Image (cartoon, helix red, strand yellow):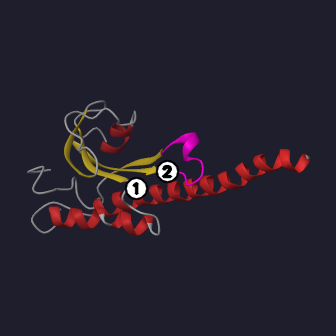
């Protein structure tokens, strides 16, 4: 009798541990993919030999599939943007590229306080690469309780080898 009462609870705990474990693994892969996108993108420079073309950007974003393997990359939204800080508190989107998502445009309000001040040395404009990855995870056993979960991460980095990174000749100059 006691076993019959406890068994459903134990079964739910056992099955939910698979969902929680998969969610944690996928979230760690999302974080790694976000870092990889930023690390690859910020290596590019300006000029005809160093700028990023659409073909190159497609190759860069395909790295997410490799990082997420063996999980499917289908429910993934990827956005890589360059943010142009024009003062300590104001920033705009210089360019943006997305896969399965929405491009950023216009002014950007997500710059952490003091990031431009500390990274730009009071010399404006200065640029940042913003990498964003979002993954819609549907639990195998607990989807009826939670529904799909969105696991996401973003990362701001400065370009490594130049003032900015050009994507299809945008910006025209740095």
Q: Which span of residues is magenta-colored?
A: 138-148
Residue 111 highlighted magenta (yes or no): no
Q: Earlier in the sequence, mark 1 or mark 2?
A: 1
Question: Mark 1 — residue?
Answer: 34
Residue 130 visible, this angle? yes
Q: What residue is drawn where x is 55% and y is 59%? A: 25
**Disc 2, SS:** loop
**Disc 1, SS:** helix
Q: Is residue 60 left or right of residue 167?
A: right
> Where is residue 99 shown, x and y percent of the image?
27, 54
Magenta region, mostly helix, strand or loop?
A: loop
In the rendered image, the vertical position of residue 64 relative to residue 7, given as above or below: below
Question: Mark 2 — residue?
Answer: 138
Residue 51 visible, this angle? no
> Where is residue 170 shown, x and y percent of the image?
12, 51
Q: What residue is drawn where x is 60% and y is 54%? A: 19
Question: Mark 1, residues whose alpha carbon is within 10 Å: few (<14), some, or many (≥20)?
Answer: many
Residue 144 highlighted magenta (yes or no): yes
In the rendered image, the vertical position of residue 104 relative to residue 45, given as above or below: above
Is 17 or 105 nearer to us in this picture? 17
Is 50 or 80 nearer to us in this picture? 80
> Where is residue 131 shown, x and y percent of the image?
34, 51
Is 35 or 150 nearer to us in this picture? 150
């Amino acid at each position: 009798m006691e076993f019959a009462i406890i068994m459903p609870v134990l079964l739910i705990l056992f099955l939910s541990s698979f969902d929680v474990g998969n969610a944690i693994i996928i979230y760690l892969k999302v974080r790694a993919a976000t870092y990889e996108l930023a690390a690859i993108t910020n290596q590019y420079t300006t000029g005809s030999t160093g700028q990023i073309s659409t073909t190159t950007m497609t190759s860069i974003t395909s790295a997410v599939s490799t990082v997420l393997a063996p999980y499917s990359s289908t429910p993934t939204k990827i956005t890589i943007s360059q943010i142009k800080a024009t003062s300590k508190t104001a920033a705009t989107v210089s360019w943006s590229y997305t896969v399965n998502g929405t491009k950023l445009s216009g002014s950007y309000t997500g710059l952490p306080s003091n990031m431009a001040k500390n990274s730009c040395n009071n010399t404006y404009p200065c640029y940042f690469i913003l990498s964003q990855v979002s993954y819609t995870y549907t639990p195998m056993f607990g989807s009826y309780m939670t529904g799909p979960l969105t696991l996401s991460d973003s990362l701001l980095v400065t370009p490594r080898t130049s003032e900015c990174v050009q994507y299809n000749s945008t910006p025209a100059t740095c």
